[in-house]
Image (spheres, grey):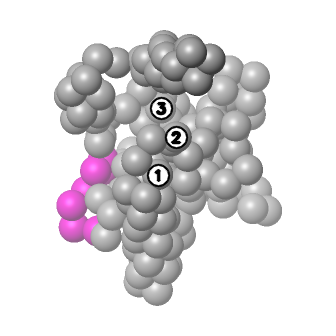
Amino acid sequence: MASERKRSSSRSLREREEKYERGTRSYTMSHIRGKDTSIEVLVRSYLFRHGLRFRKNDKRYPGHPDVVLPKYRTIVFVNGCFWHAHEHCPKYSMPKSNIEFWTAKLLRNKTRDAAQHAELEAAGWRVIVVWECELVKANREARLEQLVQQITGTCDK
């Protein structure tokens, strides 16, 4: 009797933890955009307001960079902390279900990013990565100002 209660309580706990009905998660995940995300739009609008002109999501370059500034030979990637496995970040955590799939996928993303950045740097481009967690309201203005300085070459980084 006690083991039966224990099984039913663990089952109800799992059901309570499940945020979506069966089959809904796949549908939800399929609608996550790959470009024009809110953080990308935020970065691009800030750069444009500060007089920088750029190309967006240019397919001629490895990784289809979010922002390409040919005048400064600079490429900016605006990365989501989850999708690009930003280590030591509170916004990144490994999903609890289907762990093998997610581990392999996020590792592939991270490896691919490193290869693309190396290829761009070898071609003479300066690569800057802006992380989602750097754009929280508390640090947003400072990070975007630093980005403009990095691009224009008016800072040490």
Q: Earlier in the sequence, mark 2 or mark 3?
A: 3
**Location of residue 91 (image quadrant):** top right
Assign the N terminus to one quadrant of the image. Answer: top right
Q: Which mark is residue 142?
A: none
Left or right: 129 as drawn, with respect to 125: right
The residue tagged 2 is 96
Q: Looking at the image, which is closer to me, 132 or 145?
A: 132
Residue sitting at x 29%, y 17%: 21
Magenta span has 6? no
**Location of residue 109 (image quadrant):** bottom left
The residue tagged 3 is 39
Residue 116 visible in the displayed image: yes
Q: Residue furthest bottom?
A: 122
Residue sitting at x 37%, y 32%: 37
Between the C-alphas of marks 2 and 1, the distance is 6 Å
Q: Looking at the image, which is closer to me, 75 or 21?
A: 21
Helix, strand or loop under label 3:
helix
Q: Residues within 10 Å of mark 1 (few under 14, many from 20)?
A: few
Q: Position of residue 40 (x, y in %)?
A: 42, 36
Residue sitting at x 74%, y 29%: 139
Left or right: 151 as drawn, with respect to 60: right
Magenta stretch bounds:
55-61
Q: Residues within 10 Å of mark 2 (few under 14, many from 20)?
A: few
Q: Amino acid at mark 3?
A: Ile
Q: Amino acid at mark 1?
A: Ile
